[in-house]
């Protein structure tokens, strides 16, 4: 394995990431919040780290194989989350120890959206902007960006793309070259971000809030610049804009590219896709359940208010964004637990959402139906079809393997949190929030994660990484066969 070549590449990518500390410097200058020097110092430290990785290994270049691709992705996310914590540690505006700073950084980059900050309203604009920007870069995966804009890396881009891109089928490419594919993904991502920002701005947000919340909406991250999240704006229009863009961002970006690259934009691309149809059905079903239960318990005074909160929370939690307009943890317990479970489904494959992904849940359901049919007709041959396409058994086996591994990681992380002294509801919802990259939990972590122990925070960071890299990418490094030549 070309270890020195891998270290060189990680150093270059950290150097690229250091540039993300420049925009907060300009924000600090514009708003005169005093945070500019802290980010300049963090930029210097990050560049030094990048040089330490890159300089001794700058002459080591080799073509990547699949194993090296997985290792680079894991190393990069681990180092990226670590150096991303530097501004939090060096800032004079926030008081964070090592575990808390790492938690905030990893939560942003993995688009989890869980925060350890109890008073967001009092933070400098530069820190607030940095948090939002972390989610935006983490949403699509900065690895894909690096492959698109840094062809001089001299690496096999397809290996990185397969390791980074979420979803069970990763070999299909929208364009013949992987660099062009990555650029196409980011083009769609950027266009959606700009559209979302303009919509928020026209709906009454300030330009700063519109930009920051477009970052966390399109990335399905969930960070906000206010303690009360989207509830701060108290606007049905802003809530509906958020819902629309969360649904758009929860759909496979390859479908967006196909729809917009056609001669005429057509919704037929989305209607034909079984995963999108299931995704929309889930949103409608959850909204209906929430509305019915809230109306039955007279939680809100009017039908319109009830529907607004039901729709927003159902879409926000099930897509794993984690925005809130009200304290949904105070609803009848059935609803918060239902929504937490819905986050296990998450968004579509190839989207910025977390969770198992809708297509995997669809395949698990189809496989269950096939087994029931086999009980009645043991000798019959049944093929699993998605749309009109029969899927090979290898894909179905991989989905079952992923599901069982996902469940095992969940159980281990939950037991680890229970061992640190966390209560059952908080531990369950915390692991669900981290592994599904959701954000808010229930019980003691309904508002923020500042009060949990440092040991619990480190466990949650690991769960975030497992969720962001879809379990296998990280878990494969712990298998002996991975390290054998």
Image: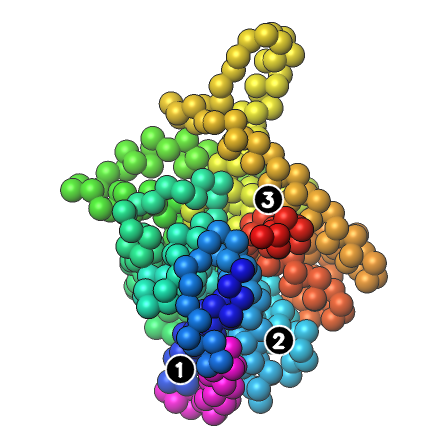
Spatial CA span between label 2 and label 3: 26 Å
Which mark identifies residue 3?
Answer: none
Check whether the beta carbons of the residues at disc 2 and disc 3 lie within 8 A of each other: no
43 magenta-colored:
yes
| Label 3 element class | loop
The x and y percentages for residue 448 are 65, 66
Percent coordinates x, y for residue 121 in the rendering: 54, 77
Distance of label 2 from label 1 (alpha carbons) = 19 Å
Nearest the eye: 448 or 298: 448
Q: CA distance from mark 3 to mark 1?
A: 36 Å
State the SS at label 2.
helix
Quadrant for residue 119, please give it: bottom right
Count residues near mark 2 (Cα–Cα under 10 Å), then give few for <14, some for 14-19, many for 20+.
many
**Secondary structure character of the magenta stretch overall:** helix
Q: Residue at x 53, y 36 (%)?
A: 360
User: Does residue 168 sit above or below 113 in this rendering?
Assistant: above
Tag 1 or tag 3, which sits nearer the N-term?
1
Residue 101: give its label.
2
Circle nearer the N terminus (2, 3): 2
Q: Report the magenta residues as a range.
A: 27-53
């Amino acid at each position: 394995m070309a270890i020195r070549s891998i270290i060189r590449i990680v150093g270059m990518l950290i150097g690229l990431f250091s540039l993300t500390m420049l925009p907060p410097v300009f924000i600090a200058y514009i708003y005169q919040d005093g945070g500019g020097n802290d980010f300049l110092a963090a930029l210097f430290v990050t560049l030094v780290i990048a040089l330490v990785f890159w300089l001794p290994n700058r002459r080591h270049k080799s073509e990547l194989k699949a194993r090296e691709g997985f290792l680079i992705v894991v190393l990069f996310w681990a180092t990226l989350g670590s150096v991303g914590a530097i501004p939090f540690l060096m800032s004079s505006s926030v008081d964070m120890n090592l575990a808390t700073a790492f938690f905030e950084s990893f939560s942003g980059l993995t688009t989890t959206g869980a925060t350890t900050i109890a008073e967001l309203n009092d933070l400098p604009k530069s820190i607030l902007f940095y948090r939002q920007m972390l989610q935006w870069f983490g949403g699509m995966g900065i690895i894909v960006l690096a492959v698109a804009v840094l062809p001089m890396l001299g690496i096999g881009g397809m290996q990185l793309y397969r390791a980074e891109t979420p979803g069970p089928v990763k070999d299909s490419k929208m364009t013949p070259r992987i660099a062009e594919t990555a650029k196409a993904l980011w083009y769609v991502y950027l266009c959606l971000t700009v559209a979302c920002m303009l919509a928020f701005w026209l709906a009454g947000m300030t330009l700063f809030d519109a930009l920051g919340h477009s970052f966390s909406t399109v990335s399905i991250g969930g960070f906000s610049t206010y303690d009360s999240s989207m509830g701060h704006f108290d606007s049905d229009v802003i809530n509906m804009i958020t819902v629309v863009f969360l649904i758009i961002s929860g759909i496979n970006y390859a479908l967006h590219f196909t729809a917009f690259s056609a001669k005429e934009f057509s919704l037929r691309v989305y209607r034909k896709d079984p995963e999108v149809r299931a995704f929309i059905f889930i949103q409608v079903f959850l909204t209906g359940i929430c509305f019915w239960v809230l109306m039955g318990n007279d939680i809100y005074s009017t039908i319109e208010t009830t529907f607004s909160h039901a729709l927003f929370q159902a879409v926000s939690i099930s897509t794993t964004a984690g925005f809130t307009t009200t304290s949904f943890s105070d609803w009848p317990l059935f609803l918060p637990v239902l929504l937490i479970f819905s986050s296990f489904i998450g968004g579509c494959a190839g989207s910025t959402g977390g969770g198992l992904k809708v297509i995997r849940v669809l395949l698990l359901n189809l496989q269950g139906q096939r087994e029931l049919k086999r009980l009645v007709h043991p000798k019959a041959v049944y093929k699993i079809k998605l749309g009109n396409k029969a899927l090979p058994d290898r894909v179905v086996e991989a989905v079952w393997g992923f599901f069982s591994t996902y469940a095992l990681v969940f159980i281990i992380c939950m037991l680890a949190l229970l061992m640190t002294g966390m209560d059952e509801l908080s531990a369950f919802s915390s692991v669900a929030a981290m592994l599904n990259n959701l954000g808010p939990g229930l019980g003691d972590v309904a508002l923020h994660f500042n009060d949990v122990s440092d040991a619990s925070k480190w466990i949650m960071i690991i769960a975030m990484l497992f969720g962001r890299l879809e379990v296998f990418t990280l878990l494969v490094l712990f298998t002996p066969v991975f390290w054998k030549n």
